[in-house]
């Protein structure tokens, strides 16, 4: 089995961007939910 070489830079940056955007979105949803719950 041949080891794949390192991924292209744009692909690695794309994954980092995707993970960052997902975490920002998750934090936003949690923050919105907490504000909604406290207003309750």
Image: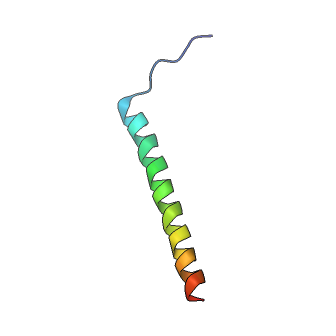
| Most foreground residue, 7 or 19 | 19
Image quarter in which the N terminus is found: top right
Residue located at (45% from left, 55% from top): 21
Compared to 21, does 30 lie above or below?
A: below
**Residue 29's spot in the image, x, y percent?**
53, 69
Left-right relation of 37 to 9: right
Q: Residue at x 60, y 89 (%)?
A: 40
Residue 11 drawn above or below residue 19? above
**Residue at the top extreme of this rendering:** 1
In front: 10, or 36?
Answer: 36
Instruction: Return the x and y of residue 4 as percentages of the image width and height.
Output: 52, 18
Is 2 left, or right, of 11 in this rendering? right
Tally the numbered discs: 0
Residue 31 location, x and y as percent?
A: 51, 71
Q: Is residue 35 left or right of residue 17?
A: right
Comparing 3 with 16, the one in front is 16
Question: Residue 3: x percent and y percent?
Answer: 55, 14
The colour style of the image is rainbow
Q: Residue furthest right?
A: 1
Q: Residue at x 49, y 62 (%)?
A: 25
Extreme residue toward the front, this view: 38
Point 39% across, 39% down: residue: 13
| Side of 14 relative to 29 (left or right) | left
Spot the residue most to the left. Answer: 9
């Amino acid at each position: 089995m041949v080891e794949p070489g390192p991924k292209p830079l744009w692909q690695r940056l794309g994954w980092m961007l995707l993970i960052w955007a997902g975490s920002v979105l998750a934090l936003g949803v949690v923050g919105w939910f907490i504000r909604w719950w406290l207003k309750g």
